[in-house]
């Protein structure tokens, strides 16, 4: 039976907060005291202390509370045990609207983002046995130390809303500075300048960790002012398929192909020491929460599962509604089965060293989006389709080595470029005219909508007579197939409605004509199947009339040995005078 003690969202938020705390620069000026280290070493039970990067240590207060400053850096440390710690935090905002103001935190990659928290509560437990809690504590006033924030270009202060107002300056010259309460000096916070308000991002939705490939393959998605990761994702999957608040994606309706289609990759089975396998996932199952059971979301198939997202190959330390898109960003929404994303990145929370190698796949993801921008046309090119299918296979494997991903990206890029170089439509060459469809040279019959053409085995357009499958066709000087009458070298030929040359009798507009074995129209007397017929100078068959001393009947056949009115024709069909 599933035991959902904590929601995936809360657990994930806890992990994100601890990363912020570990890497953001949170200290309070404390005088170094070697006796503190001695006290630390004297402890026998597991407990938590905070160590600054310069080696100083701060212990918790009597009420198990840390008071920290945003501008310094340090790490929380679990002492008194050799067991691997698992940090869990939850934030609580305790300010009124009138007291509310934004302050800047830094994430693991040095990017500053607004974060408003007055108190953080946390605990550290045994990573191998989450029920074994070592220490609970809180972090108080974590953002109240920054009292004022200003924007500068050089030494000139500018508006936070419009930092580009100084003429001739670039976005890289904009700096944000914050002042700590009780101090006068503003210290630089290296945040990026405001993003563009419109552009395109690449979005993919992936369920590789359960062996079901993409839900949505990479596509370009336009964004405008006010868009965030939640609104952009809804453009791809549909609002009706988004389960959860805008700040947190709980599930995607229609995202699961079924329990019997779940195959947990071998690397996850090894990574989890056998705790997450295909067998355990299928046994755990996917609950039907009123969505027919086809939604894929938190706690489906694993106690560690849920949706995460990465921007430009990096984990994002805040909710999807807080992400502001930048032109060219790559957003990959990925389903995790183990380690709150360890199976997606190869990294464990709090451990700077990867435990498995999972390379960045943004470049190949962008190339796939480029194909999907004109999928029908590009995938019709065999070279592109083969390279794209190979890319899907390698990206879906997650742990594919970087060398193979790079090679696949190069192959796909070359295929797309080659397809763009090959023309579509008519191309005149030294050998003659060729025609291309979806980048491929046409061989054989070509229907352009108005005319039929025949391209030989080299793709060269034919003119004149062409023999195809035992039938003769005539292509005019422009290569178009002729139907109806055509005059060639002083002879008339008749091509039926499909363009094939006719031999023998043919009826055209109520008149009969006879074409010899080579298709040429006959005139004068012609013997067919033991009967003689007379064909006028225009080729039409004469009927019910005298042709000199001979009479042709209604069916065109010459009369023999019979009276025609008062005239008699002999066995050769000739009129016998004075008979």
Image (cartoon, rainbow, N blue to C red):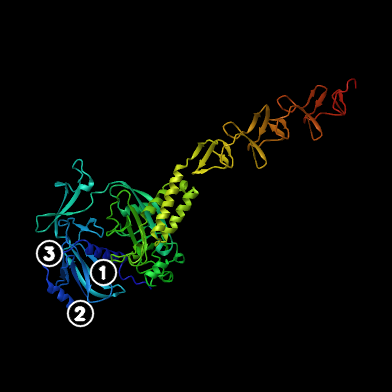
328 to the left or right of 51:
right
Q: Residues within 10 Å of mark 1 (few under 14, many from 20)?
A: many
Q: Which secondary structure lies at badge 3?
A: loop
Give residue 44's mark. Answer: 2
Is residue 279 placed above or below 217 in the rendered structure? below
Residue placed under numbered mark 1 in the picture: 87
Q: Residues within 10 Å of mark 2 (few under 14, many from 20)?
A: few
Alpha carbon separation for disc pair 2 and 1: 20 Å
Mark toward the viewer: 1 or 3:
3
Alpha carbon separation for disc pair 1 and 3: 24 Å
Residue placed under numbered mark 3 in the picture: 29
Query: What count of labels does the image hold?
Result: 3
Q: Nearer the viewer, residue 376 or 121?
A: 376
Q: Are marks 1 and 3 in contact (CB under 8 Å)?
A: no
489 to the left or right of 161:
right
In the picture as drawn, the residue positioned furthest to the right comes out as: 579
Alpha carbon separation for disc pair 2 and 3: 27 Å
**Residue 45, picture quadrant:** bottom left
N-terminal of the pair, mark 2 or mark 1, is: 2
480 to the left or right of 153:
right
Point out the image quarter for the C terminus. top right
N-terminal of the pair, mark 2 or mark 3, is: 3
In the picture as drawn, the residue positioned furthest to the top comes out as: 578
**Residue 275, picture quadrant:** bottom left
- Residue 286 appears at what percent x and percent y? 40, 66
In the picture as drawn, the residue positioned furthest to the bottom comes out as: 44
Residue 286 in sight from this viewpoint? no
């Amino acid at each position: 039976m599933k035991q959902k003690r904590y929601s995936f969202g809360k657990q994930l938020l806890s992990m994100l907060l601890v990363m912020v705390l570990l890497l953001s620069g949170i200290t309070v000026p404390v005088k170094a005291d070697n006796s503190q280290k001695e006290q630390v070493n004297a402890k026998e039970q597991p407990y938590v202390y905070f160590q600054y990067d310069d080696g100083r240590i701060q212990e918790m207060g009597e009420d198990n509370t840390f008071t920290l400053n945003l501008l310094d850096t340090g790490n929380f440390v679990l002492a008194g045990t050799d067991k691997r710690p698992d940090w869990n935090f939850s934030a609580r905002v305790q300010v009124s609207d009138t007291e509310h103001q934004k302050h800047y935190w830094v994430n693991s990659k040095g990017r500053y983002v607004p974060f408003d928290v007055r108190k953080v509560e946390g605990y550290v437990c045994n990573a191998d046995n989450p029920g074994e809690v070592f220490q609970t504590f809180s972090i108080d006033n974590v953002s109240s130390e920054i009292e004022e924030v200003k924007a500068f270009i050089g030494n000139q202060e500018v508006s936070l809303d419009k930092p580009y107002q100084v003429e001739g300056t670039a976005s890289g010259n904009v700096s944000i500075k914050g002042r700590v309460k009780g101090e006068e000096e503003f210290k630089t916070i290296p945040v990026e300048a405001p993003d563009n308000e419109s552009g395109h991002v690449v979005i993919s939705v992936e369920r590789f960790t359960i062996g079901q490939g993409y839900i949505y393959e990479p596509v370009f998605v336009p964004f405008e002012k006010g868009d965030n990761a939640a609104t952009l994702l809804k453009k791809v999957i549909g609002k009706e398929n988004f389960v959860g608040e805008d700040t947190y994606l709980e599930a995607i309706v229609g995202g699961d192909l079924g329990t019997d289609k779940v195959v947990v990759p071998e690397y996850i089975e090894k990574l989890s020491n056998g705790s997450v396998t295909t067998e355990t996932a299928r046994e755990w199952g996917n609950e039907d929460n009123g969505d027919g059971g086809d939604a894929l979301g938190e706690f489906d198939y694993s106690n560690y599962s849920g949706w995460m997202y990465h921007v430009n190959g990096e984990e994002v330390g805040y909710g999807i509604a807080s992400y502001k898109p930048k032109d060219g960003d790559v957003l990959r929404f990925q389903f995790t089965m183990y380690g709150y994303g360890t199976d997606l990145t190869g990294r464990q929370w709090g451990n700077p060293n990867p435990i498995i190698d999972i390379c960045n796949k943004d470049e190949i993801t962008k190339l796939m989006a480029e194909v999907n921008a004109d999928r029908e046309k590009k995938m019709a090119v065999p070279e592109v389709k083969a390279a794209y299918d190979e890319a899907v296979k390698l990206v879906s494997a997650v742990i594919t080595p970087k060398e193979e991903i790079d090679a696949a990206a190069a192959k796909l890029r070359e295929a797309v470029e080659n397809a763009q170089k090959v023309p579509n439509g008519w191309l005149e060459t030294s050998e003659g005219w060729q025609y291309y469809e979806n980048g491929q040279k046409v061989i054989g019959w070509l229907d352009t909508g108005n005319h039929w053409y025949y391209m030989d085995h080299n793709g060269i357009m034919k003119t004149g007579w062409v023999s195809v499958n035992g039938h003769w066709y005539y292509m005019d000087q422009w290569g178009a197939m002729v139907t109806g009458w055509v005059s060639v070298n002083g002879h008339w030929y008749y091509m039926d409605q499909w363009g094939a040359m006719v031999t023998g009798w043919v009826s055209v507009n109520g008149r009969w004509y006879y074409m010899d074995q080579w298709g040429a129209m006959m005139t004068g007397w012609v013997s067919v199947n033991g009967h003689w017929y007379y064909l006028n100078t225009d080729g039409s068959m004469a009927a019910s009339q005298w042709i000199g001393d001979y009479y042709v009947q209604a069916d065109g056949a010459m009369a023999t040995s019979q009276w025609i009115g008062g005239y008699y024709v002999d066995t050769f069909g000739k009129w016998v005078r004075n008979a």
